[in-house]
Amino acid sequence: MLDAILSGLNALAEGGIFMVQHGGANLIMLAIAGVMFYLAIAKDVEPLLLLPIAFGCFLANLPLSEVMHQGGVLKTMYDFGIGNELFPLLIFVGIGSMTDFKPLLAEPKLLLFGAAGQLGIFATLILGLIFLPLVPGINPAQIKETAISIAAIGACDGPTVIYVSNMFAGLGKIDSAMVGALAVAAYSYMALVPIIQPPIMRLMTTEKERMVKMPSVSGKVSKNALIAFPIIVTVITGIIAPKGLPLMGMIMLGNFMKVTGSVTRLCKASENEIANIATLFLGLAIGGTMAGHQFLKLQTLLVFGLGLVAIIIDTVGGLLLGKIWYKLSGGKVNPLIGAAGISAYPMAARLVQNEGQRWNKQNFLLMHAMGANTGGQAQAPSF
Amino acid sequence: MDNFTFGLTMLIVGMGGTLLTLWLLALLIKGITQLFPVEDDQPKND
């Protein structure tokens, strides 16, 4: 009994000494975990992912924590599902089974907004290539891949960012500690889309443009067309961009199960249990990579700064295409729908609907915006 | 190839390729919806 008490006190003392000698960075990370807990619980900011990430961060930064050592619980989760990109792919099956491509199939031209909404990716890539060499301590051989990983935040799609960055980390092309920062930045900005987009929408469009009323989309698409769509897109992706096939294949598998209607149980499991379990483990393992001494670097600040720029440029790109379309159509297309050409689904489409109704109560842009939004959603994995 | 040229190439090729791919996909979707029109598999009173 006495031995056990002494052993406990000894561990407590060791933990205290560790925190005093080396724990500054860990203390900052514990505070960051606290902020993430607050955002997830009190402010409802992407709680499904932010809460497990925060808990993983909390566990990894406790003194003498061994959760990310070989054989540790978070390291095991990381190796099991992130090191080999399994968890993001499982989440994509769930996203596919939750996505309704009907508005897109009814108005396929809206797909082009998905391209304009990706402008942030490529513009941020250039900015990353300019600024990363100025960051002290960065390996010059890793600049291109690091810039690509940061630019992926512009896809506005968390699993895509994790997939891309983790693939590079596995190849030793980027610092593996960056995966956590990239994931947190991606999910944070996805959650902040309702705050980031509306001011840009108002800044870039005139009141007259925002008030444009568009004819309603019928939304009627045959079941055969809905079934053919995921199969054909998968085949085309496999031919044009085989590296994107795992992500696109999984999203289309989920959608295929949904539209056939013959595997309801699998579809519901993909939407709920599989996506939820994968999200929990992914969040915890990503949080585990946020150990203070690895996370608190100038690179992390750059990731967050450039990530914000990427989302802003995405919105600007979509709105610019919307304005061009407005002019070409003789004022029949509401340029606001361009802002929905990102992958934050269906949040971006709802924002467009709200913004349109704010200026014209007779305006129902939701179906058009959903078409653009599914275009962005479908485009993200092919990045 | 220096970093900036690489970035600019990616911007032009990436955006061009993305627009082209999505335009082709939009044409393909139009083809699919024409190949499988609504009337084929939905009752008229629907």
Image (cartoon, rainbow, N blue to C red):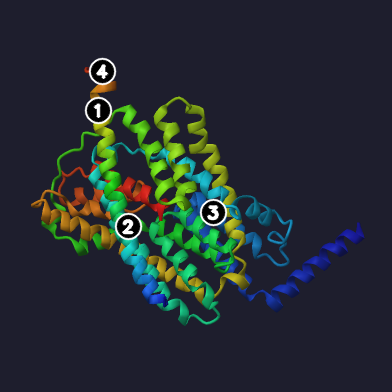
Disc 3 and disc 2 on one polypeptide chain: no
Which residue has dot 2 on it? Answer: B17
Rounded to the nearest whole Å, what is the CA distance between mark 3 and mark 2? 38 Å
> Which residue type carries mark 1?
Pro
Rounded to the nearest whole Å, what is the CA distance between mark 4 and mark 3? 47 Å
Are the two marked residues, 1 and 4, in contact with CB atoms closer than 8 angstroms?
A: no
The percent position of residue A206, horizontal first and vertical second, equals 14, 60
Q: Is residue A241 positioned above or below A220 on the image?
A: below
Rounded to the nearest whole Å, what is the CA distance between mark 1 and mark 2? 30 Å
Rounded to the nearest whole Å, what is the CA distance between mark 1 and mark 3? 46 Å
- The residue lying furthest to the left in this view is A330
Q: Nearer the viewer, residue A221 or A354?
A: A221
> Which residue type carries mark 4?
Pro
Q: Nearer the viewer, mark 4 or mark 2?
A: 2
Disc 1 and disc 2 on one polypeptide chain: yes
**Does residue B2 appear left or right of residue A179 in this picture?**
left
Which residue has dot 1 on it? Answer: B37
Rounded to the nearest whole Å, what is the CA distance between mark 1 and mark 4? 12 Å
The percent position of residue A195, horizontal first and vertical second, equals 33, 59
Are there few (<14), some (14-19), or many (20+) residues within 10 Å of tag 4? Answer: few
> Which residue type carries mark 3?
Leu
The percent position of residue A93, horizontal first and vertical second, equals 48, 41
Q: Quadrant of residue A189?
A: bottom left
Helix, strand or loop at label 4? It is: loop
Residue at the (47%, 73%) spot, across then down: A301
Which residue has dot 4 on it? Answer: B43
Mark 1 or mark 2: whose residue is earlier in sequence: 2
Q: Is residue B7 positioned above or below A43 on the image?
A: below
Task: Identify the chain of the residue marked 2, using the numbered disc in the image.
Answer: B
Residue at the (55%, 80%) spot, across then down: A137
**Does residue A29 appear left or right of residue A245 in this picture?**
right
Q: Is residue A214 visible?
A: yes
